[in-house]
Image (cartoon, helix red, strand yellow):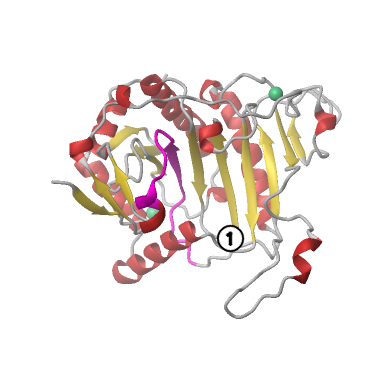
Amino acid sequence: MTQLRRDPIRGHWSIIAPGRTRRPDEYDVKVIKPTLEGQCPFCPGNEGMTPLEIDSVRPSPSEPDSPGWAVRVVPNQYPAIGAQDERHDTIPASELFRVRDGVGAHEIVIATPEHGRRASQFGVDQWDKVLAACQYRLQELARDRHVKQVMLFQNHGAGAGASRAHAHFQILALPMVSTALAHEVLNGRSYFNRKECCLFCDVLKSELGFGVRVVSEDDAFVTLAPWASRVPYELCIMPRSHRASFLDIGAPERHRLARHLRDILHRLEKLFGELPYNWVLHSVPVREHNPRIFHWHIEVIPRLGQMGGYELGSGGYINSTTPEAAAEDLRSLAGD
Ligand SMILES: [Zn+2]
Ligand SMILES: [Zn+2]
């Protein structure tokens, strides 16, 4: 019989369909390169093709907007948020049809100067540099009083929404709290109000007790296949030490994250070869006052299939690989 599982953190229901369980080699994994052709604006020498840089990591001194960088942060040329668009000014809103100005920011973190290098192929040192640059930008953007949430994510492959092949991460500063984060905050708060402890810490403790969904662990981070995984081989990277915000972590923990994240992407590529994926940072909303209700983490979402009518129509998921099988497959691989 199939099993319905409720996610304790996110609140959705997933149907875990063991009769349909597929093994890693049964997924038809293709990474389709993004279709944008021509010169790559993210390559060294083409700095003039992007808006002026906001920040960069330069191992030896060189001018802004010139080659020599290891990481480069630029405004998104086509921002999802933070751009003026007068076309909206004439469209009426109402109590039913609410509207709010799209204030905020949308930045691109060009994660390597090397065009063909995937994030899974970065050294720990490069990961560390990129994560430090991201953390700094998130901290800066969170200072704006309009900003309620800062997001960091990567799309890899056209199947995961990437429009450029050159490895880059995206940062969004939002004037609202996204639905996904709001659900986690709500569940975290109600659990805290009942039990006076952190929902996420308790989930982590239970998962370490069961062990069957643990993929990898070190002294700072644990990666799990979540109990009610939405898609096959979905993963969650959780820091062991309770902190609500990624913005507050120190350099040693960030360095451990660099190592851990690299290891997880390696494992996925060992199992599937190059695959499309997204990873998304979940950090507490910037105006949240109680740091005990939330615990920052990273969701890793391999894109092995498409969403169907059930998913779009119900807000729930049908997952054809049990999280236990996914964890076992990934656990048996050494990342490095
Ligand atoms: Zn490039
Ligand atoms: Zn916690």
Task: Tell me where residue 319 appears, x and y as whole percent.
Answer: 30, 42
Foreground: 292 or 78? 78
Task: Tell me where residue 191 appears, x and y as whole percent.
Answer: 33, 65
Decide: few, some or many residues near mark 1? Use Cα within 10 Å; few <14, some 14-19, many ≥20: many
Position of 245 compared to 307: left or right? right
Task: Tell me where residue 14 appears, x and y as whole percent.
Answer: 29, 51
Determine the image quadrant of residue 54. Answer: top right
Query: Is residue 307 a member of the stretch shown in magenta?
Result: yes
Foreground: 66 or 40? 40
Position of 81 compared to 227: left or right? right
Q: Amino acid at mark 1?
A: Val
What segment carries the magenta color? 290-311
| Residue 292 in sight here | no
Residue at label 1? Answer: 286
Foreground: 242 or 15? 15
Q: How many marks?
A: 1
